[in-house]
Amino acid sequence: MGRSPCCDKEGLKKGPWTSEEDTKLVRYIQIHGPGNWRILPKHAGLERCGKSCRLRWTNYLRPDIKRGRFSFEEEESIIQLHSLLGNKWSAIAARLPGRTDNEIKNYWNTHIRKRLLRNGIDPVTHAPRLDLLDLSSILTSPHLNLSNLLRLQTLLNPLTLTLLSSNVENPNMLLQKLQENQLLDSHNLNNQTPTFQPNQFENLINQQNPSNLADSSLPNPPQSAQNNLGQLPTTSPSTSDQVFQNYCPTNENGSNFFYGVSDRMKAVDLSENSSFDSVISTPSASTFINGGTEDEKESFCSNLLRFEIPESLDQLDYFM
DNA sequence: AAACAGTGCAACCGCTCTGAC
DNA sequence: TGTCAGAGCGGTTGCACTGTT
């Protein structure tokens, strides 16, 4: 289409609104109601363009607007809604009474987005960012046990393994290292998508190193490892931390659900009855189960499969 | 104490889309 | 069918505030 901007007139005021302007705008809207933004400034005695008046009203002066910090529930809602709706701020705002799309957008960009990135979660896809895993420290560890890696690789999706290795200083180092030790075979890499049975990975590690069994006597995993896996510190969580604790939940045993990003992703934990009911109750899951478009089903399924990484991967820290 | 850098937020810009006329 | 106002969005800017050097 292409229209000339509404604010191209000379002499119209820009910048922060004064209390006097606010009063004029509120008084006019109280009498005449919102709308007719093009003629409103003139009738209200404002040297502003209509769009500026509309934005000021919708983003700041509306009586139903809630000011102040976002609550824990609001922050959690924003994250979950964003995982479902994307950058549709108005749609998100419609589900958060008293909050405007602009306010939510700003809050997302200045707080939530940064925190997601800091915790290794892609704010666009809400997926864990495997490229941020600090595997270089793992791979350079003198305690690296290649026989464990051999067992791991039979369980890991080869693509995942490839992705993991991409973070090493020399991206091919791990693959080369493994291949040299005949730890990877080309058939696996090229043709096979291993089927991972719940708890298989964890059991294997525990068999190999019984001392690694989840045990209350064990100290918490190193902070860096927790953060790299999208897990927040467990001590004295702040409101924001609590959000992300939910965002990256743990199972009954206290081990991480690496991909507990949104409700739809919780469905990965089908081995644990604890999560399944809650999964079914989520909008995306119920859409999937009760019908919905093919796109929705595909999206739902692809998200289930996309992050199928053994939950006990974080225990690498224990046995190295 | 002053300068500087980083952060948060309100507001703006430019554009597209939608629906009414 | 075309035009226009309003709504929505992503990106950006400007400024106040705070923390650091």
Image (tube, coloured by chain):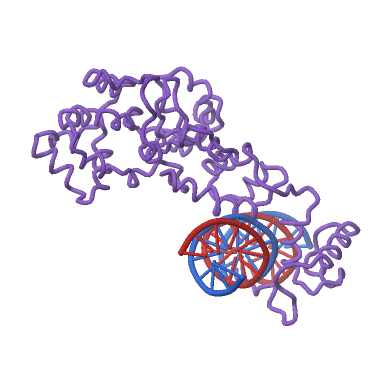
Chain colours: A purple, B blue, C red
Between A309 and A111, which is closer to the camera in this rendering? Answer: A111
The quarter of the image holding the N terminus of chain A is bottom right
Drawn side of residue A308 relative to residue A2, left or right: left
Number of callouts: 0
Quarter location, residue A223:
top left
Q: Residue at x 88, y 56 (%)?
A: A30
Quarter location, residue A228:
top left
Drawn side of residue A118 relative to residue A200, left or right: right
Between A73 and C21, which is closer to the camera in this rendering? Answer: C21
The quarter of the image holding the C terminus of chain A is top left
Image location of residue A28, percent across then percent down: 88, 62
Q: Residue at x 59, y 51 (%)?
A: A107
Q: Residue at x 71, y 73 (%)?
A: A14
Between A223 and A21, which is closer to the camera in this rendering? Answer: A223
Q: Is residue A25 above or below residue A134?
A: below
Q: Is residue A232 above or below residue B3?
A: above
Image location of residue A114, percent across then percent down: 49, 50
Drawn side of residue A268 relative to residue C7, left or right: left
Image location of residue A319, percent across then percent down: 25, 28
Q: Residue at x 43, y 36 (%)?
A: A231
Residue at far bottom of view: A10
